[in-house]
Image (tube, rainbow, N blue to C red):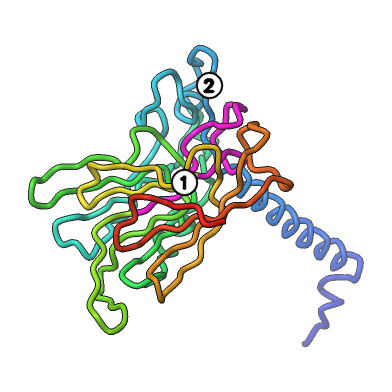
Amino acid sequence: MRYRLTHLFPLSNKIILSSFILIGILSSCNSRKKELKEEQIRISTSEPSSNKDTVLNSIQGNVSLNQIATKPNSVILTGLPEHRLVTVYKSKVYTNSPEKKLSDSRYSNNDYSDTREVEHFMPGIDILYGYNLLNIAHYDMKNEKLNFLFDHPALIKTLYYPSFIQDSLDKKPILRNYYLVSVYDEDTNKDTLINRKDLRKLYYFDASSSTKIQLVPSGYSVDRSQYDPQNDVMYLFAKQDTNKNGTADIQEPIHIFRINLKNPVLAKRLY
């Protein structure tokens, strides 16, 4: 005997069921939006709490990766055979209660894995976009030495590195021998958080990561970039923090800097 769906689930029950499903979807979306806003590092100004999770999720005293739960995610193959990069992400933290699990990022590994790589964003350069990416470790294959690009946890937004696959510019082979990193690494607005409300910086690192140079002057927040293939130049659009409140406000002026990608150790303002 065949039954219609209405016989198994009366109309009123179907409406209730649909309502629950819709509420679940909306709750999931709202939760997702909330999570995206929670990409931040909290800087504690008080004494360390007895709560283990609080200590793991905040920076107490001297900044250290040991104070935030992290884990390596993958090894980035660069176009420099002796140099490899390791991505270090914020990892899951669990409460003392086995029944209740909490996560810093509340995402599975795949949600902030290294799948957002974009090959050859600029000739000879690949990029990786970060979410809860707290540091990059550099490994020297020849000397078997590991060191971090940053000496404290930061929110890395974009990593530019020498492309693994040989690239060319004007039909000539090109090999970059440096890394560029756009990052939030300082609580510039003094709200005890390092997040998108702070000023975004851009750094240059040489191949061995021993030299670190801030390309755009302090007091600016890098917003976006544009590539000029004829001159092999990257233009950087940055807001100037004219009111010195440590954040990039909508009404503040935008200036343009240029860096020569053949030797990007100096950013010159052109507008």
In which quarter of the view is residue 37 placed? top right
Q: Is residue 52 above or below residue 168?
A: above
Lower sequence index among marks 1 and 2: 2
Residue 28 x %, y %: 68, 55
Question: Residue at 38% of width from left, 33% of height from top?
Answer: 152
Query: Rounded to the nearest whole Å, what is the CA distance between mark 1 and mark 2?
Result: 28 Å
Look at label 2 and name its amino acid.
Ser
**Residue 72 magenta-highlighted:** no
Q: Which residues are magenta?
A: 180-200
Residue 112 x %, y %: 46, 55
Secondary structure under the numbered disc 1 in the rendered image = loop
Determine whether label 1 and label 2 are within 8 Å by CB.
no
The residue that mark 1 highlights is: 216
Quarter holding the N terminus is bottom right
- Binning the other alpha carbons within 10 Å of mark 2 as few (below 14), some (14 to 19) or many (20 upward) gives some
Question: Residue at 39% of width from left, 46% of height from top?
Answer: 203
Quarter holding the C terminus is bottom right
Q: Nearer the viewer, residue 93 or 173?
A: 173
Q: Nearer the viewer, residue 104 or 19?
A: 104
Secondary structure under the numbered disc 2 in the rendered image = loop
Residue 85 x %, y %: 27, 53
**Residue 183 magenta-highlighted:** yes
The residue that mark 2 highlights is: 44
Q: Is residue 256 above or below residue 43?
A: below
Compared across the picture, whether 149 is left or right of 26 comes to left
Residue 156 x %, y %: 45, 47
Look at label 1 and name its amino acid.
Val
Q: Nearer the viewer, residue 174 or 133?
A: 174
